[in-house]
Amino acid sequence: MTRRDNLETPQSGTSREHPLSADSRFIEVNGFDVHYRIAGNKKPLVVLLHGSFLSIRSWSHVFEQLAEGATVITFDRPAFGRTSRPLPSKHNGVSYSPEAQSDLVIALIKKLGFSKAVLVGNSTGGTLALLTALRTPQHVEGVVLVGAMIYSGYATSEVPAFMKPLMKAMTPLFSRLMKFLITKLYDKNIRGFWHNKERLSDEVLAAFRSDLMVGDWSRAFWELFLETHHLRLNERLNTLSQPSLVITGEHDLTVKTEESFRLARELPGAELVVVPDCGHLPQEEQPEAFIVALRNFLKKVQE
């Protein structure tokens, strides 16, 4: 396995308004200036996909340790973190649709010199991990779904087609309204991801907020919202051919544990790990247990 390190020149509209960590990098992929981190030099390649309203910061407790036995990439998904937020136009081909985000995952790993990866997705990142595995199985070695939205939320929401023209025409109004609502409810929403709220410090919460609220962030999130549609992933679960692992926090209230149990039953040959004393973000609340589960899975994928 080889990789090519790329540090591209920033494009206009990039989200670089905060101090960057020493290993932050940017690369142009499908019209986005993607902010990413990469570490490690062993097989397999592992790509970490964060959930909505978060950023690559969500993997900070596990990133370095996972890189000791693999090559690990994490990046800020479109509309989040420091990845640029270009507005779609007929000229730039930019899209925030689930399918376009799935294409971006594969385009990113190819641009960095890889051909296959194990996808690890949390929450809506899990939605995209499964979607990518189903759409481009030749590029996915395995899938780890952590509190993944498959039967609810992002995977099943849909903006009615007849409403889209009106909603697009009223974009300035709706994006301002969305900005107001997200800003008002952000702290409460993020704290709800944790089972033990004391584990989320005010400093980390402020950092997540700062990662999201960059530039014209509400307009980009509005574009993502407009492209939401029912993915019907539940109807295709039995076609997944890659090894899969389902991880859920024992007290996940965002994607209820029952949904993860169902997912593990319906995915062919899936393993299930329940992390005790934990909510929606096992990699944040119980990083050691998360690392053990993921390392065990990666060993099996490589056998």
Image (cartoon, helix red, strand yellow):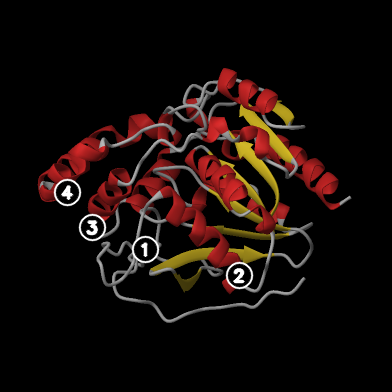
At 69% across and 38% down in the image, what residue appears? Answer: 290
Q: CA distance from mark 4 to mark 2?
A: 33 Å
Residue 294 percent location from the top left of the image? 73, 42
For this rendering, which residue is in front, 57 or 229? 229
At 66% across and 26% down in the image, what residue appears? Answer: 266
Q: Amino acid at mark 1?
A: His
Q: Can you identify the residue that label 2 sits on?
A: 110
N-term mark: 1 or 3: 1
| Mark 4 element type | helix
Label placed on residue 168:
4
Are the residues flagged by discs 2 and 3 in contact, CB closer than 8 Å? no
What residue occupies the far right of the structure in this picture? 303
Q: CA distance from mark 1 to mark 3?
A: 15 Å
| Mark 1 element type | loop
Residue 114 percent location from the top left of the image? 67, 69
Residue 196 percent location from the top left of the image? 52, 25
Image quadrant in which you'd find residue 268: top right
N-term mark: 4 or 3: 4
N-term mark: 4 or 2: 2
Q: CA distance from mark 2 to mark 1?
A: 28 Å
What residue occupies the far top of the structure in this picture? 258
N-term mark: 2 or 1: 1
Q: Can you identify the residue that label 1 sits on?
A: 18
Q: Amino acid at mark 3?
A: Asp
Q: Amino acid at mark 2?
A: Lys
Q: Can you identify the residue that label 3 sits on?
A: 216
